């Protein structure tokens, strides 16, 4: 499931990622090696030279004038790769420096512990190198929430796991370039529709996403392919084309969800 402007979304997410010290401003800078950085701490570049090297001018790229999301200010959220100069990259690296400041960069840090963040729907990329018939399954994460939601709404738990794997690779802080949030990548409007207060809380996200899946399965008489297509592209697109829309992203997504669904059913 997948629109907020690029700069505004980066601003909001970075503001949520850590304490802002400039009224919610988000700063962008490029170091001598050409590495792009985003931060909500002014003059952050002076503290990160030991990680990626270089100093550079820093510019404010966005301001967060809203207090939306203050309830999840302690949630770690990865910024989506929406900036024009970063669209050619597929990975963002996140690390916390000695001052406790969180950094996001498009180049692997040299002397820092870091995590990699996949900011696109893993199964939506037509150029993905993942072997979906062999990639490791996750049969334990959020098991209680998945099984409870699946039972409550009459959905195969294996399908819920397949959707989570395809959408976020089980990252509860995942955010898509279009603003979809959390494990099952709920758009804000969808989350609101199902009464979700915080889409980054796994239990809330799974319950709402599974409820949405149940509605789609009912609409398409249990057809998993049509359901997956609608989950990705929207019911309107499925109706317009009378089936899986001719979007490359949606076609590979449907195929990969099908593969994952069968594998999660058998656990192999």
Image: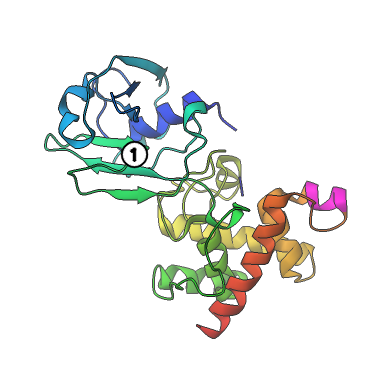
Q: Is residue 1 magenta?
A: no
- Above or below, 225 against 88 in this view is below
Expressed as whole percent of the image width and height from the top left, the position of residue 253 reads 65, 59
Residue at 11% across, 38% down: 98
Q: Is residue 240 magenta?
A: yes
Residue 147 seen by the camera = yes
Q: Nearer the viewer, residue 151 or 165?
A: 165
* Quadrant of res 223: bottom right
Expressed as whole percent of the image width and height from the top left, the position of residue 46 reads 17, 22
Magenta range is: 237-241
* Quadrant of res 35: top left
Residue at 75% across, 71% down: 222
**Residue hosting label 1:** 107
Residue 155 seen by the camera = no
For residue 59, side relative to residue 255 (left or right): left
The local crowd at label 1, few if under 14, some if 14 to 19, many if 20 or more residues have their Cα within 10 Å, is some
Determine the main secondary structure of the stretch shown in magenta.
helix
Residue at 49% across, 74% down: 147
For residue 96, side relative to residue 248 (left or right): left
Expressed as whole percent of the image width and height from the top left, the position of residue 19 reads 24, 30
């Amino acid at each position: 499931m997948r629109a907020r402007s690029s700069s505004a979304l980066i601003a909001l997410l970075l503001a949520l990622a850590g304490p802002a010290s400039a009224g919610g401003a988000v700063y962008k800078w490029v170091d001598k090696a050409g590495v792009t950085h985003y931060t909500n701490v002014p003059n952050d570049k002076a503290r990160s030279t030991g990680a990626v090297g270089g100093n550079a001018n820093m510019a404010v790229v966005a301001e967060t004038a809203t207090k939306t999301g203050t309830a999840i200010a302690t949630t770690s959220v990865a910024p989506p790769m929406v900036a024009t100069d970063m669209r050619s990259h597929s990975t963002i690296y996140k690390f916390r420096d000695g001052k406790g400041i969180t950094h996001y960069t498009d180049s692997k840090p040299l002397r820092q512990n870091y995590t990699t963040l996949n900011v696109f729907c893993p199964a939506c990329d037509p150029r993905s190198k993942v072997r979906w018939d062999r990639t490791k399954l996750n049969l334990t994460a959020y098991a209680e929430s998945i099984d409870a939601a699946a039972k409550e709404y009459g959905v195969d738990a294996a399908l819920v796991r397949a959707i989570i794997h395809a959408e976020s690779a089980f990252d509860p802080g995942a955010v898509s370039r279009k603003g979809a949030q959390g494990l099952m990548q709920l758009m804000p409007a969808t989350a609101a529709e199902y009464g979700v207060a915080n889409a980054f809380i796994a239990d809330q996200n799974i319950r709402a996403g599974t409820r949405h899946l149940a509605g789609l399965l009912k609409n398409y008489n249990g057809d998993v392919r049509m359901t997956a297509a609608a989950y990705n592209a929207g019911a309107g697109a499925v109706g317009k084309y009378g089936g899986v829309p001719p979007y490359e992203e949606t076609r590979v997504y449907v195929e990969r969800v099908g593969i994952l669904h069968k594998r999660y059913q058998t656990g192999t």
